[in-house]
Image (cartoon, rainbow, N blue to C red):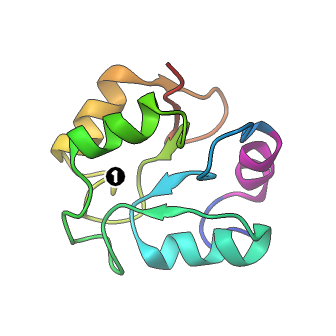
Amino acid sequence: MGGGVADTTVKYLVANQGEATWLVAVSSAQQASSIILSTGRPVIAMGGFTGSDPAMTVPRLRELLSSGRLRYVLTGGGPGPGGGGDTEVTTWVTANCTAVDGRTGLYDCAA
C-alpha cells in the first residue's frame, strides 16, 4: 500500500490524521508517492525526490506542527532529512516527538 511503509502504518495514519492537512512527512518523494497513490491524501516529501535535498528545516517543520497542519513524521527511508541519517531535522524529531508504539520510525508530534 505505502511503498516500503507497512500497510498497517499507512492505515494507522489515515485513521489518526484528524484535522491535519498533511497525512505524514516522509524522507522522499519516492516514499511519499506510494502513500499518496494508495490513500489519496497529501504527504510531505521532506528531502525532495531522492531524500537528499535539504528542503525541510527545523523552523519550517515546527511551524507546520504548531499550526496543526502536520502531526506525524516518518523517519527512515533514505539519506536525507527524515531519512534515518543524523540530520538536524531527524535529530529534532526524535528529541521532541513521541515514537508511536509498534510503528518503526513513526513519530507523533502533536503539540
Residue in view at x 23 percent, y 64 percent: 55
Q: Which residue is mark 1?
A: 82
Examine the image and state in which quarter residue 97 appears: top left
> From the viewer's perspective, is residue 36 above or below residue 92?
below
Q: Quadrant where the N terminus lies? A: bottom right
| Secondary structure beneath label 1 | loop
Q: Amino acid at mark 1?
A: Gly
Percent coordinates x, y for residue 28 in the rendering: 40, 70
Examine the image and state in which quarter residue 42 appears: bottom right
Q: Is residue 46 left or right of residue 20?
A: left
> From the viewer's perspective, is residue 41 above or below residue 58?
below
Percent coordinates x, y for residue 18 in the rendering: 74, 36
Q: Which residues are magenta?
A: 6-15
Is 110 inside the magenta-drawn segment?
A: no
Q: Is residue 8 left or right of residue 36?
A: right
Q: Is residue 78 left or right of residue 9?
A: left
Count neighbours of disc 1 (C-alpha within 10 A) and say few if under 14, some if 14 to 19, many if 20 or more: many
